[in-house]
Amino acid sequence: MGQRPNQLTPHASPQHFLGAAMRDWRNLRKLSLAKLKALIRYDYSYMGRVERGDQAPSEALVAAYDQALEAGGALVRLYQQFRQGADIAALSRSHVAKAGPHVANGQPALADDPGHQATSDEEGVAVPCRTSDGRIIFVSIPRRLFLGGAGAAALGIAGAPFAQASSPAPPILVPERNPIEHLQEVRRVLIDSDNLFGPRQLIPKVQEQIHAITALREGKRGADRRQLLRVQTQFAELCGWFHQDAGDHRAAQYWTDRALQWSHMAGDPDLTVFILARKSQMAGDVRDPVEAVDVAEAAEESARPGTRLAAVAATYAAHGHALRGDAQESMRAYDHARELLHGDINPDSTWGVWLDDAYIDVHRARSLSALGDHQAAADGFRAAIAALPAGYHRDRGVYLAREALAHAGARDAEQASVVGLEALAIGAETGSARILTELAQLDSDLQSWRAVPSVREFHDSLNASVLHEAQ
């Protein structure tokens, strides 16, 4: 028989509490210390001492645990509270065991219960902040402060939508209507609202729906339960997208992974392929070319004929090739995506209905920029933006920001700053981290042209749109 694990004493100190939580997550994932050691490459005895509370963990170790055990940021947040001097009572209230004994004495719920992912007033909201050395980073401030006006003022956004999000009403399911139809309608409204106003005020709303669907599944069986699970998967993917656009890649990865897991449970291969393609897109956004290509190719191979899913996957794979510096393979993949798009597509298929030639063109332009062909990229962005439907407000801002970067790469500083100002207006309205991240890079790229009036105007406007690090 193996040695029985030591009984933990989580309430002895915050250090013991954190160590016990780290063991809880490891046990939840059914990993021994040895197996986890093989994943994160830390000393076995050090990990054991940390879990027992005999030694304080480093921030890097906690982050490695969190990522390897897919804790969705729970361990990192707990560590931050520990560093800030929170007492045991405060930790108990904010940890997974909100009442009663520590999670070590019960079943951990955070990773498998999306209701625990609902936003609280103390949860951080990522907002742009300019550091003392001129960089723009995204920092986390408590939601209660953000909703109180600090974040809205920093981004130039009216506070009303955020005030609504701060005290969410429970989701209303109309009794005489099919709940699936109602949920799908709610999802469409959330998608349309996101394109107009950005994701921040919508994240609590989509999490409410996920929690409501979990409750609805309790009383269902068979096909009805699978159908609800399918809709829950779509909301989880949407939640991942909202977090991605808000600049929280850890939360985006968490929810997209949950969506992938639930898609398998729902038995929907098309949904699984779509989420794989989304994971490829996310990998491209964080400049991970190997993951972007490999996941996209797996999605394309699994895509059923007659859908646009193979073309979606090929589009994201093409950008992965560009990030690797392989121009020939990237352009070939874009041509392949276009061939798939114009192939034998079932007109009744609802998958990837937004994929068209303009969508492929705008991604191709982004890849050309990554490959150093900046003028061709700028021309491609301009043409694709002109073809963008009127309702795609936030997406227009993303593409404008990327066009501005391409102009800067082509050494057209004045045009870069003019287009950058257009993008900044949309970034301020929507709070899109994707837009503001691109514009922070643009500001850096234009530094040597700061004497040009339009460049200076862009720099000053960007400065006025973000918080600043205390000096």
Image: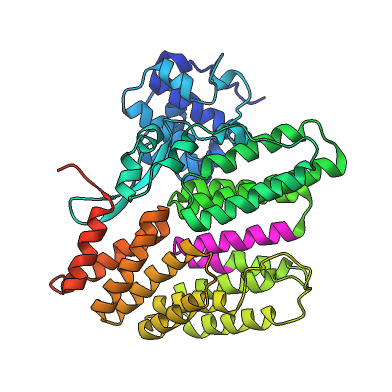
Residue 434 visible, this angle: yes
Position of residue 280 relative to residue 342, above or below, is above
In the rendered image, the quadrant that contains the N terminus is top right
Can you give x and y, in whole percent of width and height, for residue 288 in the image?
A: 47, 63
Name the residue at 55% across, 42% down: 70
Question: Left or right: 20 with respect to 169?
Answer: left
Q: Nearer the viewer, residue 311 or 176?
A: 176
Q: Main secondary structure of the magenta part?
A: helix
Position of residue 407 relative to residue 204, above or below, is below
Would you identify the image quadrant in which residue 49 lies? Answer: top left
Would you identify the image quadrant in which residue 24 lies? Answer: top right
Range shown magenta: 270-293
Name the residue at 55% across, 50% down: 240
Can you give x and y, in whole percent of width and height, for residue 102 in the image?
A: 54, 18
Name the residue at 28% across, 78% down: 415
Question: Left or right: 246 with respect to 254?
Answer: left
Question: Left or right: 109 with respect to 119?
Answer: right
Can you give x and y, in whole percent of width and height, for residue 317 in the image?
A: 57, 72
Name the residue at 42% across, 65% down: 397
Q: How is the image coloured?
A: rainbow
Position of residue 41 relative to residue 216, above or below, is below
Magenta-colored stretch includes residue 306: no
Magenta-colored stretch includes residue 274: yes
In the rendered image, the quadrant that contains the C terminus is top left
Can you give x and y, in whole percent of width and height, for residue 380 in the image?
A: 45, 82
Q: Nearer the viewer, residue 83 or 378?
A: 378
Residue 44 visible, this angle: no
Q: Nearer the viewer, residue 219 or 319?
A: 219
Q: Nearer the viewer, residue 301 or 166?
A: 166
Number of callouts: 0
